[in-house]
Amino acid sequence: MAMEGGAQSDYNSSTEGLQEHSSSPRKSLSPPPSSSDHEENTISVKFLLSNAEAGSIIGKGGSTISDFQSRSGARIQLSRNNEFFPGTTDRIVMVSGPVEDVLKAVDFILNKLLSESYVEDGGSVDPRSKVRLVVPNSSCGGIIGKGGAMIKAFIEDSHAGIKISSQDDNFPGLHDRLVIVTGTLGEQMRAIELILHKLAEDSHYKQNMNAPFPYAAVYVGMNYGPRNGVGGRFPNNRYQNNVQSNTEDRNNSVTIGVADEHIGLVLGRNGRSIMEISQQSGARIKISDRGDFISGTSDRKVTITGSQRAISMAESMISQKVARVSESDEFVKG
């Protein structure tokens, strides 16, 4: 969840505390389902959180997540702190249960994150933030609707911005897309409610929502290609032909290309960024000297060595750093 930064505030477990940033009128949620269709209305929703946000939701000794589960009736699961959604350094949270319980839990989570980042500016306008839902490719069509009619109706009803990531941007083997919901908390919750009720009608959706982190195969076959300033990927030695047997072999090596103008992002000031990536991933990272490019390109060579898992994590972190600048460049140009 991306939002404006601000001072940290203590978590208030009272209902009043959780509603303090929902001052604008919010449309009431749909009536709770009757007991007869309780099971049929059970659903799961996944969305992304930074590692820091995930820690905030878990709370000291798991106190916060236990409180949210108890009060909402939904189950809340998070991927491990080194299990990220492909192409990001963000963890996946999955909330499961009857639709209304899921909506309560999501409201608790977003409220808490908003209260910790909200900057009091004396204005009457509610802060806006971004939530990235993870939805299977096969279910995105239902949200879009014929000619985009469904997503337009959701936007008009909720007043939130709703965008779906392009399927062309997916990593090989990844069958999920991001549904990005932007707006105030009330607008986001209304949009999420509409989306969830639509997904509940999709018989294939539930079958694809088994665990918060089903992406191991994607990490094995990750290949960035020439997008977001990260160029080709060239497996070295045994990594290319014998990945499965070398999962924990720390001598695997991969070379990727990073545009020369973006290499500073990977290095960071005084080498700080590359050290952090190396420490967090466990991989060794070496960048070619100036002027030493991948043949036929202006991309510097970034060689990553370690276990398959370490290499995948380091690649993901590097791609994320470069992608942020590429997205900003595109925004300015647009």
Image (cartoon, rainbow, N blue to C red):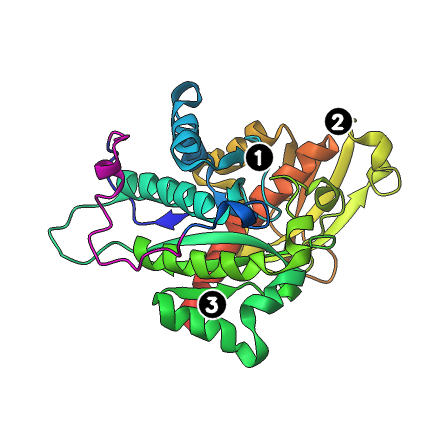
Residue picked out by circle 1 = 79
Q: Residue at x 64, y 46 (%)?
A: 209
In this image, 259 relative to 151: left or right? right
Give whichever of 253, 90 is nearer the camera.
90
Residue at the farthest right position: 241
Residue picked out by circle 2 = 250
What kind of residue is marked 2?
A: Arg
Q: Residue at x 47, y 59 (%)?
A: 180
Magenta-colored span: 10-31
Label 2: how many Cα within 10 Å (few below 14, some 14–19, many 20+): some
State the predominant SS element of the stretch in magenta: loop
Give the spatial CA distance, label 2 vs label 1. 24 Å
Relative to 201, residue 151 above or below: below
Residue 330 is labelled as 3
What kind of residue is marked 3?
A: Glu
Give the spatial CA distance, label 1 vs label 3. 31 Å
Label 3: how many Cα within 10 Å (few below 14, some 14–19, many 20+): few
Give whichever of 233, 109 is nearer the camera.
109
- Label 2 close to label 1 by CB (< 8 Å): no
